[in-house]
Image: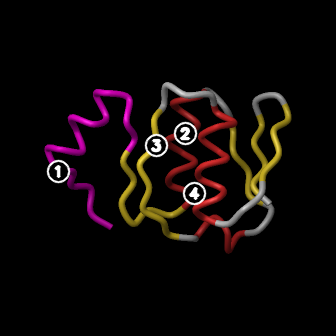
Amino acid sequence: VTGQAEVKDIKEWKNSILVFKDQSLAQIATQLERAYDVKFSFRNAQTAKEVVTVTLQDNIPLNQTLRILGAGAGFKYSIDGKNIIIK
């Protein structure tokens, strides 16, 4: 995976839109940890490797972001304070 971003993607990041193209859930979780000040953990290592393309907003509540991401990527999750467990 290269670290190049398209100009359109950079503009969207500045507008609180998070664009993830062909990234693993682990990579997306790292970005969401920074955006929401939380910590992700995966119960299944294979789930962390799942590759998805998704556009999210970081100015909506975390549980709504997780609902969208979980529905698209097919995982369940639980929230325990600042800890997010991906099942």
Q: What's the CA distance linking mark 3 and mark 2?
A: 10 Å
For marks 4 and 2, give the CA distance. 10 Å
- Numbered mark located on residue 56 in the image: 3
- Which amino acid lies under the numbered mark 3 shown in the image of this protein? Leu
Q: Label 2 amino acid?
A: Leu
Write the start and end of the magenta stretch as one range. 1-18
Give 78 or 1, whichever is nearer the viewer: 78
Q: Residue at x 54, y 39 (%)?
A: 32
Select label 3 or label 4 by which is in front. 3
Question: How far apart, in angstroms, are the residues tagged by discs 1 and 4?
Answer: 21 Å
- Contact? badges 3 and 2 (CB < 8 Å): no
Question: In this view, which residue lies farthest toward the left?
Answer: 7
Residue 6 marker: 1
Category of crowding for the residue at label 3, using alpha-carbon neighbours closer than 10 angstroms: few (below 14), some (14–19), many (at least 20): some
Q: CA distance from mark 2 to mark 1?
A: 20 Å
Q: Is residue 15 left or right of residue 84?
A: left
Q: What is the quadrant of the N terminus in the image?
A: bottom left
Percent x, y of residue 46: 67, 74
Q: Earlier in the sequence, mark 4 or mark 2?
A: 4
Q: Residue at left 69%, top 45%?
A: 40
Task: Name the front one of labels 3 and 2.
Answer: 3
Circle 3: element type = strand
Q: Is residue 85 magenta?
A: no
Residue 3: image location, x then y, percent: 27, 56
Secondary structure under tag 4 reads helix
Q: Position of residue 43 (x, y in %)?
A: 80, 62
Instruction: Tell me if 87 is positioned left or right of 48 in this view.
Output: right
Q: Quadrant of the C terminus?
A: bottom right
For the residue marked with disc 1, what is the amino acid? Answer: Glu
Mark nearer the N terminus (3 vs 4): 4
Residue annotated with mark 2: 32
